[in-house]
Image (tube, rainbow, N blue to C red):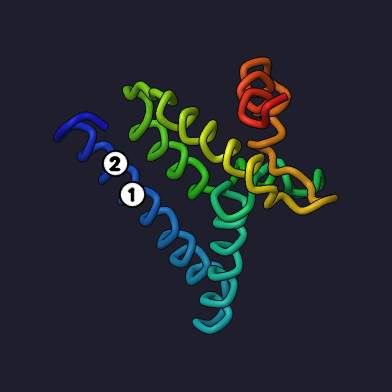
Amino acid sequence: GDGVAGFLRGFAACALTQLCGSQIVGLSAVLLPNQELAFVTSVAINIVAFITAGFLIKTSNLPAFAAWIRYFSPVKFGFHALAVNEVASRRFDVTLQVTRLDAALGEVGRSGCARPGAELSTGVAWWLQSQRGRAVTRAALGD
């Protein structure tokens, strides 16, 4: 975020997310007959909330029958609020990263350290599929 206002928005998002988690414990304590059962149930609910929030497991990797659970996760909305607060007003310049990737791909091409038959990472596959990536890689490899 930007300055004090961004800090306060981030702090509020964290505090509200924590309060939602503790209220799940409180609700379990009211609805269930004993403290042990309430604690175990609330921990299970909070674990599901964290798993479906999107930062432990990508939500696109959740099975279809479980993907809808993320919309009941207070952690998901808190995480989303923090992410928006941190990056909404920022601009990103990737020139330095592209330069470093050019150099790294050039080193891999010159040293031959890529294993035969190894799968490319998503980033490298994207780079090689792009027009600029192919041109830079061919130039680095001497093609």
Residue in view at x 39 percent, y 24 percent = 92
Above or below — where is 28 with respect to 10?
A: below
Q: Secondary structure at mark 2?
A: helix
Above or below — where is 75 with respect to 82?
A: below
Q: Mark 2 sits on what residue?
A: 10
Quarter of the image holding residue 143? top right
Q: Quadrant of the N terminus?
A: top left
Residue in view at x 26 percent, y 36 percent = 9
Q: Amino acid at mark 2?
A: Gly
Q: Secondary structure at mark 1?
A: helix
As drawn, the residue found furthest toward the top would be 131
As drawn, the residue found furthest toward the right would be 117
Q: Nearer the viewer, residue 77 or 138?
A: 138
**117 horizontally vs 128: left or right:** right
Q: Position of residue 44 (x, y in %)?
A: 60, 68
**133 horizontally vs 120: left or right:** left
Quarter of the image holding residue 96? top left
Question: Are the two marked residues, 1 and 2, in contact with CB atoms closer than 8 angstroms?
Answer: yes
Q: Mark 1 sits on what residue?
A: 14
Residue in view at x 57 percent, y 42 percent = 107
Q: Which mark is residue 142?
A: none
Q: Position of residue 129 (x, y in %)?
A: 73, 24
Above or below — where is 127 with respect to 55?
A: above
As drawn, the residue found furthest toward the front would be 142
Q: Amino acid at mark 1?
A: Cys
**65 horizontally vs 36: left or right:** right
Spatial CA distance of label 1 from label 2 is 6 Å
Q: Position of residue 53 (x, y in %)?
A: 56, 48
